[in-house]
Image: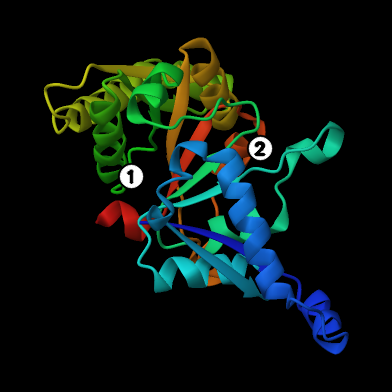
Amino acid sequence: RRTVITVDDPLLANAAAMAILEPPLAVQSEAELRRFSDDVLPHLATRATMLDFRVATGKPATEILRAANQTHADLIVTGSHGRSGLQKMFFGSTTGRVLRETSVPVLVTREERPASASHAEMARNIHRVLAPVDLTAASGRQVTFAAAIAEQLRVPLIVAHIVEPIFVPMRVRQALSGADTIRRAEVEAGLAAIEASIPPGVTTENVVSTGAPAEEIVRLAETRGANLIVMGLHSGGMLGPRMGAVTYRVLSATKALVVALPPAAAAS
C-alpha cells in the first residue's frame, strides 16, 4: 500500500474553521490531493484502492513521521526542494527534519530525475548504485541494502571508501614512509570483507579514492553514472539523532536519487 499525505497549516485550518468554509478545508485538501495524484500517477488512476490519502494539520515533518509510524511504512519518499543560487545548498526544513528523525529509509527525489512507473523504467534510468561506506559497523548492513536494490534493478553496484587526506609534518612523514600504503591496504581489506557478503549475482566494483568525502562521492556518482546513492544516517551522541555532515552535503549537491538509511533501518 502507498500512502499519499498533505499537511495543512494550523493557522489556515483555524481561519477556515472560523469562516465556516464549505466544504471544509480538509475535504478540499483531499480533493486536491486526489487530483494531483491522478495527474502524476495516471497509471494508478483506475486502481485507486492502491493509494491511501491522508490530510493532516500541523508541522509537516511531524505529521509525515507520524503517518509513517502509523502505517508501518517501509520507505518515505520526499523531494529535496532544491532552489537556485545560494538556497540550492540547503534543504527545506521539512526534508531536513524528516532525515534527522526518521527511523525508516528515506528516498530523496530530485526534480532533474525522470519519473519511473515500474521496475523496468527505473532500471533504464538508474545505471549503477553507489554505496559510499566509512567501514564502521553499519557499513555491512548499508551495503546489503544497496546490493538488494542493485539486484532487483539488475544494475552494477559500486562500493566506495573515501580516504580523507591528513596533514603530516615532513619529519614525521619521513619516519613513517609507508603509512599511506598501509592505510590504503587496510581500506582495501575492509572493502574486500564487505564484498564477500554481497550476493554473487550482483556485479560489484570496489573504489578507493582520496579527497573530501562529500565532493568525491558526488564526483563518483557523476563520472560512473551512479544515478542512485545509498548512504547512512548516523546518530550523534548527546544531541540525539542527527544527519551526518557528509550525507547532508551529498544530498545538497548531487543530482542523483539518494536513499538515506538510518541505523535502525540498516539493522533490519
Q: Please provide percent x and percent y for residue 23.
A: 74, 76
| Quadrant hosting residue 84 | top right
Name the residue at 31% across, 51% down: 266
Mark 2, Cα crowd under 10 Å, few <14 / some 14-19 / many 20+, is some
Visual colour scheme: rainbow
Q: Amino acid at mark 1?
A: Thr
Residue at the spot of label 2: 252
| Label 1 residue SS | loop
Residue at the spot of label 1: 136
Inspect this view and state whether residue 169 appears. yes
Q: Nearer the viewer, residue 238 or 254?
A: 254
Q: Quadrant of the N terminus?
A: bottom left
Label 2 vs 1, first from the N-terminus: 1
Number of callouts in the render? 2
Q: Please provide percent x and percent y for residue 49.
A: 39, 57
| Label 2 residue SS | helix
Q: Nearer the viewer, residue 51 or 114?
A: 51
Q: Quadrant of the C terminus?
A: bottom left
Q: Amino acid at mark 2?
A: Ser
